[in-house]
Image (tube, grey):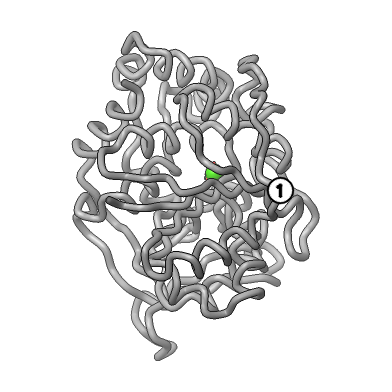
């Protein structure tokens, strides 16, 4: 049984990733921790509770940090909708989050089940940085850490060189890469290698299930944004790829380990994830960078999640 915790800024691709996780056999989601990112933390928390209503599962949800460690709050409502789920009118859940803060929940669960839980972060890394400050041994108490984050070739999606999850809280990301010995990284550039085209999107939208309809409804705003930006029907599922690789690393077909650090002060490069591809700095690799994966297996996992 693969036991996981998902730290999320539940937005639309987070929602798809969460459905993917629920659709996999032998996976137990121990908890969700929520963070400010695509939208504010009250909305990201409310969105996870809505998804629990959809899948009919009871998983504890811990509300996390409402703002980055240092930077001002930065959101992506233009892509994910004001409510974070495409403003599709998904009804509010009656469920409530746990009282405990997400950072404390990460520390407590890691200490309660040392080495047994895989941590997956698909939003800004604020909760993880806070938890690391509370318990610096955390990396040795989780089985592993996989993040969706970074622009490994500096092809950013938020500023010129930075990917959103890193840019939104660059200080938190720097802390995580400095203090977590090995982070599995699913970057924005690797995400862009595996878009879903119009035909595949239509297939996912028309599976005749409640989850498929939910996915259709929440993605309309994002698809409109992508059509406007890329002038074609493309759908990127960054978080889904990260969760799939974390749940089943055997779908990773090419990866490299290198030292990676986060730029904080560059005039135009804040949030840059600088990868030492040639080992010039002589520092030990702290990132397992996913370069290619088995897309057919990934499509199967998405279908499992929408069934
Ligand atoms: O850059 C993509 C990432 O930013 C995804 O996690 C998406 O949900 C947003 O948080
Ligand atoms: Ca996300």
Against 247, residue 108 (above or below) is below
| Image spot of residue 265 (x, y percent) | 70, 72
Around disc 1, counting alpha carbons within 10 Å, would you say few (fewer than 14), some (14 to 19), or many (20 or more)?
Answer: few
Is residue 169 positioned above or below 96 on the image? below
User: Nearest the camera: 102 or 237?
Assistant: 102
Please state if 155 lies on the left or on the right of 10 as rendered.
left
Residue at 28%, 28% in the rendered image: 304
In the picture, measured across the screen, residue 240 lies left or right of residue 102, that is left
How far from the left and from the top, in percent, is residue 243? 38, 47
Q: Residue at x 60, y 23 (%)?
A: 86
Ligand 2 quadrant? top right
Q: Label 1's element?
A: loop
In the foreground, 226 or 141? 141
Q: 257 or 30: which is nearer to us? A: 30
Q: Residue furthest bottom?
A: 282
In the rendered view, does 20 fall on the left or right side of 34? Answer: left
Q: Residue drawn 47% across and 52% down?
A: 5
Q: Is residue 88 above or below residue 183?
A: above
The residue pinned by badge 1 equals: 99
**Residue 306 percent coordinates (x, y):** 35, 23
Q: Nearer the viewer, residue 304 or 291?
A: 304
């Amino acid at each position: 049984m693969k036991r996981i915790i998902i730290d999320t800024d539940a937005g639309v691709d987070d929602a798809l990733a969460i459905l993917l996780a629920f659709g996999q056999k032998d996976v137990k989601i121990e908890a969700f921790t929520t963070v400010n990112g695509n939208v504010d933390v009250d909305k990201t928390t409310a969105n996870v509770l809505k998804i629990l209503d959809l899948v009919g599962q009871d998983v504890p949800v811990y509300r996390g940090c409402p703002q980055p460690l240092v930077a001002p709050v930065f959101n992506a409502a233009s892509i994910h909708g004001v409510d974070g789920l495409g403003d599709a009118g998904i009804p509010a859940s009656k469920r409530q989050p746990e009282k405990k803060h997400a950072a404390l929940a990460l520390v407590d669960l890691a200490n309660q089940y040392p080495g047994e839980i895989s941590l997956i972060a698909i939003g800004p890394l604020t909760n993880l940085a806070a938890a690391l400050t509370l318990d610096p041994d955390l990396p040795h108490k989780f089985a592993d850490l996989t993040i969706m984050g970074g622009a490994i070739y500096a092809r950013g999606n938020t500023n010129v060189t930075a990917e959103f999850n890193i840019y939104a809280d660059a200080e938190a990301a720097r802390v995580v890469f400095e203090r977590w010995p090995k982070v599995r990284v699913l970057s924005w550039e690797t995400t862009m290698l595996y878009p879903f085209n119009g035909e595949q999107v239509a297939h996912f939208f028309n599976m005749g299930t409640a989850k498929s309809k939910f996915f259709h409804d929440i993605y309309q705003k994002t698809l409109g944004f992508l059509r406007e930006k890329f002038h074609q029907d493309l759908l990127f599922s960054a978080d889904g790829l990260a969760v799939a690789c974390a749940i089943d690393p055997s779908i990773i077909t090419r990866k490299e380990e290198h030292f990676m650090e986060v730029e904080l002060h560059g005039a135009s490069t804040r949030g840059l994830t600088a990868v030492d591809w040639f080992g010039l700095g002589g520092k030990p690799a702290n990132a397992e960078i996913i370069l290619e994966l088995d897309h057919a297996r990934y499509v199967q996992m998405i279908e499992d999640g929408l069934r």
